[in-house]
Amino acid sequence: MRQSHQLPLVGLLLFSLIPSQLCEICEVSEENYIRLKPLLNTMIQSNYNRGTRAVNVVLSLKLVGIQIQTLMQKMIQQIKYNVKSRLSDVSSGELALIILALGVCRNAEENLIYDYHLIDKLENKFQAEIENMEAHNGTPLTNYYQLSLDVLALCLFNGNYSTAEVVNHFTPENKNYYFGSQFSVDTGAMAVLALTCVKRSLINGQVKADEGTLKNISIYTKSLVEKILSEKKENGLIGNTFSTGEAMQALFVSSDYYNENDWNCQQTLNTVLTEISQGAFSNPNAAAQVLPALMGKTFLDINKDSSCVSASGNFNISTDEPITVTPPDSQSYISVNYSVRINETYFTNVTVLNGSVFLSVMKKAQKMNDTIFGFTMEERSWGPYITCIQGLCANNNDRTYWELLSGGEPLSQGAGSYVVRNGENLEIRWSKY
């Protein structure tokens, strides 16, 4: 339940003077829209055989105003299947994304949110996350990225959530913002978006709380923004290539918490455009995650009561054009070293087709020796997620998972996305976060 204390009028007036509604935004100019075509092609031409994989793309395209009727219809059907047939299997964050995608603007699909009581179901899933945290030393059923998505969706769609629980669990030093000692930029960025939404709801009087709650949310946001900026690289990327889009969204809505010279938005934008030209965003969800920020949009622009806009014409998109794939000049093979590390290290050499992904190496090794290299996986919104190797399974309550590495360095892409290179030393390691 929401807190029932009314924010004092003086506090309301003071906090209303904070320029939290103002954003420092840079975006791709119209003459550079052509540089976004690789992102759009990735999203348009991918095979969406699972509704959860389509959700990010629907949300991203609708948020920036790109309406591709045939593609949208296909993906909405996948989402409807999830809503009608397997909602109990959908995680809290996936359900939050479904709500955001269906209600990004006023449209017919928005009715699904209310026909299937999705807000009520998200409230229940969010509460289950909180209960798991109370029972398992602060660890949610999923992770803090999804927990932040839950709060964001409940905030934007007027669901019930406890501001006291938000203040209690979203402290910047919470272990769930980290993988080991490494701060997770995309997790922190999603938390900033969620906290900013809650703050605006408090200021606007949509949610009741005392002045201390609002002050704490501002303190938390400032600290998270500082942590995000501390991960800025010399070339402007924040965290890594794939976390930069959501970091940009967070910085767009929190410009009152940092100085103008703390972040060169245009440099970040230019570097991301260079990464796009080099094929970095070959995963449709990665493409969908970065597109809104490049168009100057954030998840806080979602408004179920506003009309949907259309910017499709600006991109000269045609879904009638045949989808072509250019074959490689010849089918060449490469050799990589692959190891599984638990208490000891198990090693093998694997030969795969040039252009293969990490997952292909794992499958080839499994065929060579199922006892040592046998594994299981789940399909998630970002692609395959490795659950078990040698019967040893990742456990969220124990904060254990299978970490992918190359040359001893953690990878920022998943097993289904990372393209391996000849002679590379690949490793999957039993790890704690």
Image (cartoon, grey):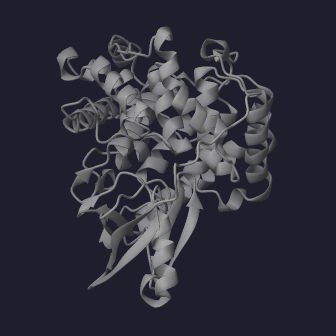
Query: Relative to the observer, which residue lies in front, 366 or 140?
Result: 366
Residue furthest bottom in the image: 371
Q: Residue at x 46, y 33 (%)?
A: 290
Rendering coords of residue 197 (x, y %): 47, 29
Evaluate whether residue 209 shows in this view. Answer: no
- Residue projecting furthest to the front: 330
The quadrant of the picture occupied by the N terminus is top right
Left or right placement of residue 178 versus residue 313 in this view: left
Task: Name the residue at 28% across, 41% down.
Answer: 239
Image vertical order of residue 422 relative to residue 345, above or below: above
- The residue under the point 66% across, 13% down is 313
Residue 415 image point, x, y percent:
45, 61
- Give above or below for 350 relative to 381: below
- Place of residue 63 in the rendered image (x, y in percent of width and height, measured from the top left): 59, 25
369 relative to 317, above or below: below
Question: Is 158 drawn above or below residue 147 in the view shown?
Answer: above
**Residue closer to the observer: 212 or 198:** 198
- Residue 42 makes an appearance in the image: yes
Image point 23% across, 32% down: which residue? 229
Q: Position of residue 241 (x, y in %)?
A: 35, 39
Q: How many marks?
A: 0
Residue closer to the observer: 186 or 73: 73
- In the rendered image, the quadrant that contains the C terminus is bottom left
